[in-house]
Image (spheres, rainbow, N blue to C red):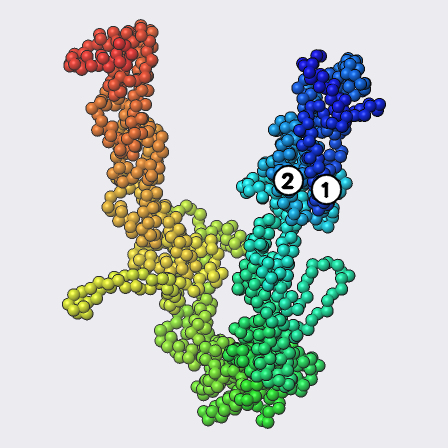
């Protein structure tokens, strides 16, 4: 391959001798020194400039050495990159311009190498060596370009090493020179810059595990020096993360990367921190940031949230040190909120995190100003702990509030936040002083006034607000009062009642002293002291440390010992007041206090009540009652017992008194004197009359029930003249209305059950076969006692044996004459009420009035008494209803009026009774309606009156009667339409539909005729008329009447009619076609006439497919018809219609 220019060849050969080092990295000949000047390619002016530049470069290298020592490790990585570069790239960096020019020509590789391999003083010798080596092969411009790019990256790193990054603009100029000198394309140079940034970033992570804020500035300056955009920075960080993780995981297990203290974990966290800051400083959108951050996190096998959490863990210590520095410079004027704001922005500290850290910093300053120890965060277990200071001596120094106010302003805290931190740290110190002061008051070494003065001074020392005094002092009362109660409990545990009693009195004195201190603080709720400080449900209260049993034991000891120490053995007002104070102090409830009083003093009350009971029953006088009451009242007042306890204690004695009276009276009925004595005891024991009912029912209830049975006699009905006597007896016995009703119902049940059982027995005998009855009763029954087995007979298809009707009526009379049924109010309704004219000034008024609605209930029923089975009860009621139909004469109306009562006595619901009546009614209605419609065709007014009478007899509602009538008519009509449609004719179909219309029966909804059958009925009426010609185009009214009568929609009827016309026309055409094929044209007259008739309804559109030859044949035959008696215009119109139908022109 030839050189493009001889001059270029000369330059190449000359440069090999004039350079201190060969253009291709080979040393000059040992036998001849090299010249002192540079390449012949470089002008002298350039050489002078280079010399000066080298001098400045030497100075920069000295500066850079210092900078590399202080930097985050990035320059160390760049230095390694340049030192580890391939040899050829080092040679190229020494003469980059030459290599750039060389790339413009196609130079055999041997020519390039020959000048160095065959050293000689003469150009010719080099040329010979080049030619000899060139035989092996050559390399073109592309290979030289690749070598140039390889050398450009170390050269780029060297520029950064030489010029640093402190002056991004100047350094960027030299960076661009590298690009131009080495002839690197823009896209390739951007990738080189990304690689250099990547290397620098990895060096920062590798050479220093702990991040520094200066490194954030380094990356920003590096980005500017390299002229990188945000996208390139994102690529660099993602690549750095992937390379770091890949190389690290070769030697470090993933478990170690989860250890926050592991060196590689520290490196990872630093990489994440630097990445997050670099991406944020780029000013891109949140979406772009998350995208790039997610790429980096994914490369490190983390989620983006985990990565951001780690970033926060790295950033917060930086800001903590800034806050610590801020605290140390308070008062110097060197700190401000703006400085902290810039720090937060640099570190990426969120507002929420900053607020928390500001609160922590303020708290640490408060603790420092108080002299408290501050947690340094040192986790060394062997570190020596500072001795705790005495909380009674710690306080804020003078000027502390000024420093805290300044710090609050710098940190941007609210007054509430700062006050809270001061309160949190100062309150325990104040409480310690308050507790000591209160204990001195309780010990008698200080007064309430002196204690309050001490607390006021202490509050001011601790910068606590005056309005908080009440809450601060209150918080210590529980602890101060808890100590004497704790001492008291120790004595109670060993049953030292005397010491327990004395210490409880001391605790009361302590309570009064504490109330005096509280009053100084502005606490004026002394009546709520126990509720506030002695709540046993609060574990921190004065008595909260004791169990319920311990508190009750203390209270019981104090109460009993108070009575024992009194002179008269009673509770005076003063003593009772002390007991109540102890009750509140120990958190004893009113219920528990009463229970203890009952246990302690109940025997005294019981003794007084027993004496009163015995004396009054033995010889009752009013004066005796008064004296007994005095004794009882004295016991009650002496021990502060309640009336409820008196009533409960007296209830048992009253029951014993009633039993005693019942035993000593003949017949069990007490005398008036006995009842007076019992009434006196009841009043003495503060019992109401209702309280005594259970005892009187227990001992006198049987007497009343016996009297009830006697009054019922053999008939079971209580005569009216006996009712007054029974009411008097009820009053005498003191039995309640409810109890006497229960007793009455028990007596009724005993009388009613045999009556029901007899009716059931007779019913089974008359209705069941011998085998059925034997199976039910479990024994053989005689053959002469059973039914004949013949089918049902009687009117309307019903049959019945009525020999039990009288027994049923006897049961009904028994129930009604004893007035057993009850009226229960189930609601209200509004009714019209007429107000007479005289009450309204001469004009009658009608107003609406709300009245109660009652329901009749049956308290005793056969089903509840278990004397009849549900199935038999229903059969009995059904038989009774059937018996009503069988009965004639005066008993008929009596039976009819009793059917509801009998059903209620049996225990049937009104719904069940109507259901049974409906079952019978269905048979009655069906038979009656069928017979009437067969003879009359429809139901007349007389028939409807009969059905109304049946409705009453069956106990049916109007709605149920109408439903059954409709069902019966539907059944008859359904059977009739089945018969009609077996052989339908227009006359029969028309008669049926007109019959239904006349009865007001809808063919679909009432009769139940399906839609398909309605269409068949329509066809049955229409088709014969169409065929005969009776139905013409002028018969529209007839068609409409038929359609409406059948209940068809107009559109639906029209579609059916068109279908009929089309079908009939097709049938007629097929008949004509068949006759023509057989040569019987005379038989075509009638079907052709029909086709013309059908065509008149559709204007000739009959959808017939007729061959033209056949169409002309049919038309010719029609033209030959005898049209006598038909108007000529009509004939011509029919011919045209036939043409249209046949498809002829």
Q: In the figure, 51 relative to 728: above or below?
A: above
Residues packed near mark 1 inside 10 Å, few (<14), some (14 to 19) or many (20 plus): few
Q: Which numbered disc flags the more N-terminal residue, 1 or 2? A: 1
Residue 1079: x %, y % from top left: 31, 5
Residue closer to the observer: 1111 or 1025:
1111
Which mark, by number, is residue 62? 1
Q: Secondary structure at mark 2?
A: helix
Tell me the residue at 44%/64% (across/down).
860
Which corner quadrant holds the N terminus? top right
Tell me the residue at 74%/31% (across/down).
85
Which mark, by number, is residue 460? none
Tell me the residue at 41%/72% (across/down).
712
Residue at mark 2: 222
Q: In the figure, 668 relative to 618: above or below?
A: above
> Is 59 on the left-hand or right-hand side of 862?
right
Q: Quadrant of residue 986?
A: top left
Residue closer to the observer: 384 or 325:
325
């Amino acid at each position: 391959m030839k050189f493009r220019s001889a001059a270029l060849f000369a330059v190449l050969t000359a440069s090999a001798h004039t350079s201190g080092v060969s253009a291709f990295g080979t040393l000059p000949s040992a036998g001849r020194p090299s010249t002192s000047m540079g390449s012949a390619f470089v002008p002298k002016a350039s050489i002078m400039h280079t010399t000066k530049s080298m001098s400045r470069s030497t100075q920069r290298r000295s500066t850079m050495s210092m900078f590399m020592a202080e930097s985050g490790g990035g320059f160390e990585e760049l230095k390694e990159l340049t030192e580890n570069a391939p040899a050829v790239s080092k040679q190229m960096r020494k003469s980059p311009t030459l290599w750039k020019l060389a790339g413009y020509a196609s130079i055999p590789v041997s020519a390039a190498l020959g000048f160095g391999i065959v050293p000689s003083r003469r150009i010719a010798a080099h040329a010979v060596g080049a030619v000899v080596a060139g035989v092996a092969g050559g390399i073109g411009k592309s290979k030289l370009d690749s070598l140039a790019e390889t050398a450009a990256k170390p050269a780029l790193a060297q520029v950064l090493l030489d010029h640093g990054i402190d002056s991004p603009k100047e350094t960027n100029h030299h960076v661009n020179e590298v690009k131009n000198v080495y002839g690197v394309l823009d896209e390739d140079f951007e990738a080189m810059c990304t690689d250099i940034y990547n290397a620098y970033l990895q060096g920062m992570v590798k050479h220093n595990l702990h991040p520094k804020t200066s490194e954030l500035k380094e990356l920003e300056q590096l980005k500017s020096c390299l002229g990188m955009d945000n996208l390139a920075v994102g690529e660099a960080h993602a690549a750095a993360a992937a390379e770091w993780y890949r190389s690290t995981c070769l030697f470090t297990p993933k478990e170690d990367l989860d250890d926050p203290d592991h060196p590689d974990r520290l490196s990872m966290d630093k990489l994440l921190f630097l990445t997050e800051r670099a991406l944020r400083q780029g000013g891109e959108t949140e979406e772009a940031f998350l995208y790039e951050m997610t790429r980096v996190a994914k490369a490190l096998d983390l989620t983006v949230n985990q990565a951001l959490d780690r970033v926060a863990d790295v950033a917060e210590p930086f800001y903590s040190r800034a806050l610590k520095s801020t605290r140390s410079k308070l008062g110097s004027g060197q700190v401000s909120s703006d400085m902290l704001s810039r720090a937060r922005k640099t570190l990426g500290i969120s507002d929420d995190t900053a607020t928390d850290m500001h609160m922590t910093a303020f708290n640490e300053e408060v603790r420092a100003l108080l002299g408290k120890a501050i947690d340094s965060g040192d986790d060394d277990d062997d570190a020596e702990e500072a001795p705790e200071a005495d909380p009674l001596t710690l306080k804020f120094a003078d000027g502390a509030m000024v420093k805290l106010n300044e710090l609050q302003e710098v940190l941007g805290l609210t007054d509430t936040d700062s006050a809270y931190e001061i309160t949190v740290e100062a309150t325990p110190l104040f409480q310690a002083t308050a507790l000591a002061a209160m204990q001195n008051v309780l010990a008698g070494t200080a007064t309430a006034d002196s204690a309050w003065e001490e607390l006021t001074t202490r509050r001011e020392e601790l910068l606590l607000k005056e309005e908080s005094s009440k809450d601060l002092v209150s918080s210590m009362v529980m602890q101060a009062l808890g100590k004497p109660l704790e001492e008291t409990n120790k004595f109670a545990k060993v049953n030292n009642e005397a010491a327990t009693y004395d210490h409880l009195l001391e605790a009361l004195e302590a309570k009064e002293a504490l109330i005096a201190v509280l009053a100084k603080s502005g606490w004026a709720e002394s009546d709520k002291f126990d509720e506030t400080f002695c709540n046993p449900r609060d574990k921190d209260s004065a008595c909260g440390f004791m169990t319920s049993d311990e508190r009750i034991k203390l209270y019981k000891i104090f109460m009993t010992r108070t009575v024992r120490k009194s002179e008269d053995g009673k509770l005076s007002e003063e003593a009772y007041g002390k007991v109540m104070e102890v009750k509140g102090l120990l958190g004893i409830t009113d219920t528990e206090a009463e229970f203890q009083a009952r246990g302690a003093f109940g025997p005294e009350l019981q003794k007084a009540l027993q004496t009163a009971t015995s004396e009054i029953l033995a010889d009752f006088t009013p004066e005796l009652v008064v004296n007994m009451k005095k004794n009882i009242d004295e016991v009650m007042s002496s021990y502060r017992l309640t009336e409820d306890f008196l009533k409960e204690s007296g209830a048992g004695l009253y029951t014993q008194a009633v039993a005693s009276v019942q035993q000593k009276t003949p017949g069990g009925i007490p005398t008036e004197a006995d009842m007076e004595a019992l009434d006196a005891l009841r009043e003495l024991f503060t019992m109401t009359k209702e309280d005594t009912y259970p005892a009187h029912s227990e001992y006198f209830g049987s007497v009343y029930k016996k009297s009830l049975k006697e009054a019922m006699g053999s008939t079971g009905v209580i005569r009216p003249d006996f009712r007054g006597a029974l009411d008097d007896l009820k009053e005498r016995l003191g039995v309640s209305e409810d109890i006497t009703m229960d007793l009455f119902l028990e007596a009724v049940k005993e009388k009613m059950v045999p009556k029901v059982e007899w009716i059931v027995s007779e019913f089974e005998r008359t209705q069941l076969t011998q085998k059925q009855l034997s199976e039910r009763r479990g024994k053989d029954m005689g053959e002469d006692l059973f039914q004949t087995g013949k089918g049902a007979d009687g009117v309307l298809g019903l049959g019945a044996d009525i020999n039990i009707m009288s027994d049923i009526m006897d049961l009904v009379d028994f129930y009604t004459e004893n007035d057993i049924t009850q009226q229960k109010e189930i609601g209200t309704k509004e009714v019209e009420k007429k107000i007479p004219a005289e009450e309204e000034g001469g004009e009658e008024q009608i107003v609406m009035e709300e009245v109660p609605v009652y329901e009749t209930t049956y308290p005793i029923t056969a089903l509840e008494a278990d004397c009849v089975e549900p199935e038999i009860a229903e059969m009995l009621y059904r038989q009774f209803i059937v018996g009503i139909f069988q009965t004639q004469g005066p008993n008929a109306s009596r039976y009819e009026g009793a059917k509801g009562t009998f059903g209620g006595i049996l225990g049937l619901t009104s719904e069940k009774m109507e259901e049974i009546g409906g079952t019978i009614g269905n048979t009655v209605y069906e038979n009656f309606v069928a017979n009437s419609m067969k003879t009359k065709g429809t139901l007349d007014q007389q028939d409807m009156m009969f059905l109304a009478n049946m409705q009453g007899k069956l106990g049916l509602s109007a709605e149920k009667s109408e439903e059954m009538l409709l069902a019966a008519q539907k059944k008859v009509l359904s059977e009739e339409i089945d018969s009609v449609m077996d052989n339908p004719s227009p006359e029969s179909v028309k008669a049926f539909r007109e019959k239904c219309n006349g009865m007001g029966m809808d063919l679909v909804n009432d009769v139940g005729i399906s839609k398909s059958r309605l269409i068949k009925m329509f066809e049955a009426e229409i088709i014969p008329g169409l065929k005969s010609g009776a139905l013409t185009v002028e018969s529209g009214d007839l068609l409409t009447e038929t359609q409406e009568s059948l209940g068809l929609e107009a559109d639906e009827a029209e579609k059916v009619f068109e279908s009929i016309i089309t079908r009939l026309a097709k049938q007629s055409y097929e008949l004509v076609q068949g006759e023509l094929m057989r040569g019987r044209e005379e038989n075509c007259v009638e079907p052709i006439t029909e086709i013309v008739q059908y065509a008149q309804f559709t204007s000739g559109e009959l959808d017939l497919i007729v061959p033209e030859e056949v169409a002309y044949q049919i038309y010719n035959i029609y033209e030959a018809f005898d049209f006598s008696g038909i108007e000529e215009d009509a004939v011509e119109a029919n011919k045209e219609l036939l043409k249209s139908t046949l498809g002829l022109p």
